[in-house]
Amino acid sequence: MSKHLSEPDLLDVLEGRASGGARAHVGDCAACRARVEEASGGLERARRCDVPEPSTLYWEAFRAQVGRRIRDEAARRRRVWPAVAALAAGIAVVVLLPGTVRGPRIHGQRLPAWSALPASEGDAGLLVLEGMAPTPEDLRAVAGCEGVADCLADLDDEESRALAAVLRGEIGGRSL
């Protein structure tokens, strides 16, 4: 061989699993032989160390920690879907509504959108809408994030693909 052996090949020589060519190279190459001998010395020292088995308390705590993380992740994923559905519905309304709603016309001309709305000072409906609006705390409790941007940032690849599929279905296959 014209080049030195790789680390995995040297490990195979050390553990007796190497091909005849690799063993022959170590026999001929002083540099590779020195690396195998150095690794062999380290392996011997590691075998002589007495490493105690962790106590049963460690394994119980480990098992509890893994279980808690699995439950937390599952709960986080369940909290994300309501926010994703709300976002999809909001996007569908924004995308689909302008193309389907026709404003009032006078003599063939469309009136400006704001002309049909009462002044905000005299509109009692605004107070009702403000009372119905969810607070940031409500959204955090349902979605588990501060806002739409935070919810979207926390999506993994699979959730992002699922959201894209839902949105495509909502807008009838049109591109966003």
Image (cartoon, grey):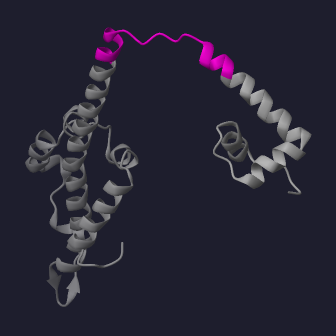
> Quadrant of the rendered structure where residue 135 is?
top left
Q: How many marks?
A: 0
Left or right of 45, for residue 158: left
Residue 155 visible at all = yes
Quarter of the picture containing the C terminus is bottom left
Q: Give me the residue at 17% from left, 90% from top.
A: 107
Horizontal and vertical percent position of residue 47? 60, 19
Left or right of 3, for residue 92: left
Q: Give me the residue at 24% from left, 60% from top.
A: 88
- Please check the rendered image and state whether residue 58 is part of the magenta-colored stretch, yes or no: yes
- Please check the rendered image and state whether residue 14 is part of the magenta-colored stretch, yes or no: no
Q: Nearer the viewer, residue 158 or 12?
A: 12
Using the image, determine if residue 55 lies above or below residue 118: above
Left or right of 72, for residue 105: left
Q: Give me the residue at 25% from left, 45% from top.
A: 80
Quarter of the picture containing the N terminus is bottom right
Horizontal and vertical percent position of residue 10? 73, 42
Using the image, determine if residue 73 lies above or below residue 160: above
In this view, the residue farthest toward the bottom is 108
Q: Give me the residue at 8% from left, 47% from top.
A: 124
Q: Which residues are magenta?
A: 44-61
Q: Nearer the viewer, residue 126 or 175?
A: 175
Horizontal and vertical percent position of residue 106? 16, 84
> Quadrant of the rendered structure where residue 36 is?
top right
